[in-house]
Image (cartoon, grey):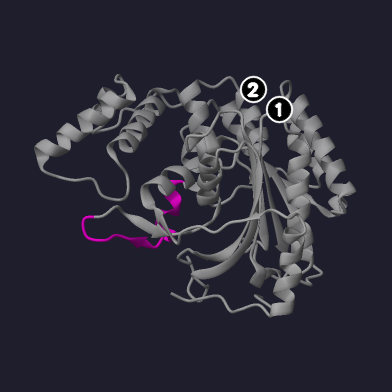
């Protein structure tokens, strides 16, 4: 495992300062995190980048790839409806390319609010915080890239898709290979998968009944599940697959509109104009929210006139469901963002919290933010 070099103390302090100015509660997270939970929340695509650790006979764990999920869990354990949490520490992800570090420092902040809090103001606060911290690293070539998972969901809702197909398209949006496969299935009849009878059987049962059936099958076969997933999680995935296979494919027109939407990458005003023409009714409210969000960012000192909106912008983690953003440096490749963040309102509820809560956060990589760092 290769570690990222240390950032000089004065540069690190400057990058950290905007976070400390918010006087958020300082938190840490265990280096070992439950593998099954993370796979369920961040997506199967991350498995190859996780460092898995398992004691003999113990639960499968992994080195923490990120702080967001454990910080959400700590917030829920506190019993509070709102809070701001600051963290700083090492995260671990296997690099897809030789020479890149697998161990690196992250600084971040997660903000949680009750259902009545002004979400747009929180979005602007977090994105502006990330911008100030990134700019403090000394780079003069930074640009803010914006996206919105909820806007794509609203666009998909307007296509009139069957519910399982709509859900599948939403999940595939941030995964190019899955999306390409979905778009290639245009006008095909519902799939009949070889070996799909188990999934079809489970799809007629409740979640608890489906998990029980799987456990009984494993017991009869004398096998145990591997890979960090339990029977309930596996049953859910099989049920979703069966439901998706029974759904019709996209029509040629629907596939074309999705391609055109996800290809949008322009200055925000131009991008939203194209989206409005392409999406029709149902997008007025989210586009009006974006107008307000941009005004708030400009008032906070973020140079929105230089920003870009990418309709396909997503992150490695699948739990984002609203605003997404990246701060990039022209000196670094596009997949090496200086800072990332976004809104993930549904994640606390998936971890057992109350529905309707709001959550948004950001993370910065100091080594990338520092002008003398990664090039």
Tell me the SS state at disc 2. loop
Q: Residue at x 54, y 55 (%)?
A: 67
Which of these two is toward me, 77 or 114? 77
The residue tagged 1 is 279
In x, y percent, where is residue 346?
56, 35
Q: Is 56 one of the magenta-colored residues? A: yes
**Could you tell me which quadrant the N terminus lies in?**
bottom left
List x then y, in percent, for residue 136: 78, 68
Q: Is residue 49 above or below residue 72?
A: below
- The percent coordinates of residue 335 (x first, y second) are 61, 61
From the viewer's perspective, is 187 left or right of 51?
right
Relative height, residue 291 to residue 127 (above, below): above
For marks 2 and 1, the one nearer the N-term is 2
- The answer for how far apart the CA atoms under marks 2 and 1 are is 7 Å
- For the C terminus, the image quarter is bottom right
Q: Nearer the viewer, residue 374 or 363?
A: 363
Q: Is residue 261 visible?
A: yes
Q: Which residue is mark 2?
A: 158
Is the residue marked by circle 1 packed among few (<14), some (14-19), or many (20+) residues within 10 Å?
many
Kindly identify the residue that appears in the image at 54 percent across and 52 percent down: 316
Position of residue 220 in the picture relative to residue 61 (left or right): left
Q: Residue at x 76, y 26 (%)?
A: 285
Q: Are marks 2 and 1 in contact (CB under 8 Å)?
A: yes
Lateral position of residue 213 relative to residue 89, left or right = left
Give coordinates of residue 187: x percent, y percent.
48, 26
State whether residue 334 is above or below residue 294: below
Q: Quadrant of residue 194?
A: top left
The stretch of residues the image draws in magenta is 43-57
């Amino acid at each position: 495992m290769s570690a990222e070099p240390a950032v000089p103390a004065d540069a690190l302090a400057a990058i950290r300062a905007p976070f400390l100015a918010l006087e958020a509660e300082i938190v840490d997270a265990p280096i070992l995190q439950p593998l099954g939970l993370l796979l369920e929340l961040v997506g199967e695509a991350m498995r190859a980048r996780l460092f898995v650790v398992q004691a003999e006979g113990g639960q499968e764990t992994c080195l923490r790839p990120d702080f967001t999920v454990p910080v959400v869990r700590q917030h829920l354990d506190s019993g509070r409806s709102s809070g701001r949490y600051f963290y700083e520490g090492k995260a671990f992800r296997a690099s897809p390319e030789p020479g890149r570090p697998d161990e690196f420092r992250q600084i971040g902040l997660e903000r949680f609010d009750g259902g009545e809090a002004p979400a747009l103001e929180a979005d602007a606060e977090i994105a502006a915080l990330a911008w100030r911290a990134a700019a403090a690293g000394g780079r003069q070539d930074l640009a803010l890239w914006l996206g919105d998972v909820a806007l794509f969901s609203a666009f998909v809702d307007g296509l009139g898709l069957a519910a399982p197909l709509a859900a599948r398209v939403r999940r595939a949006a941030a995964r190019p290979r899955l999306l390409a496969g979905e778009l290639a299935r245009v006008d095909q009849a519902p799939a009949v998968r070889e070996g799909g009878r188990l999934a079809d059987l489970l799809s007629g049962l409740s979640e608890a009944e489906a998990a029980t059936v799987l456990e009984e099958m494993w017991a009869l076969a004398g096998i145990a599940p591997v890979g960090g997933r339990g029977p309930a999680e596996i049953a859910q995935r099989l049920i979703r697959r069966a439901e998706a296979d029974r759904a019709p494919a996209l029509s040629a027109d629907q596939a074309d509109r999705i391609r055109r939407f996800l290809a949008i990458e322009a200055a925000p005003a131009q991008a939203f104009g194209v989206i409005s023409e392409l999406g029709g009714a149902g997008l007025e409210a989210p586009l009006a929210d974006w107008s307000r969000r941009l005004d708030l960012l400009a008032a906070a000192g973020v140079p929105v006139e230089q920003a870009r909106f990418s309709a396909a912008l997503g992150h490695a983690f699948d739990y984002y469901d609203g605003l997404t953003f990246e701060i990039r440096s022209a000196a670094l490749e596009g997949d090496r963002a200086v800072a990332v963040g976004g809104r993930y309102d549904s994640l606390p509820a998936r971890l057992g919290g109350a529905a309707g809560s709001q959550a948004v956060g950001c993370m910065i990589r100091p080594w990338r933010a520092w002008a003398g760092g990664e090039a």
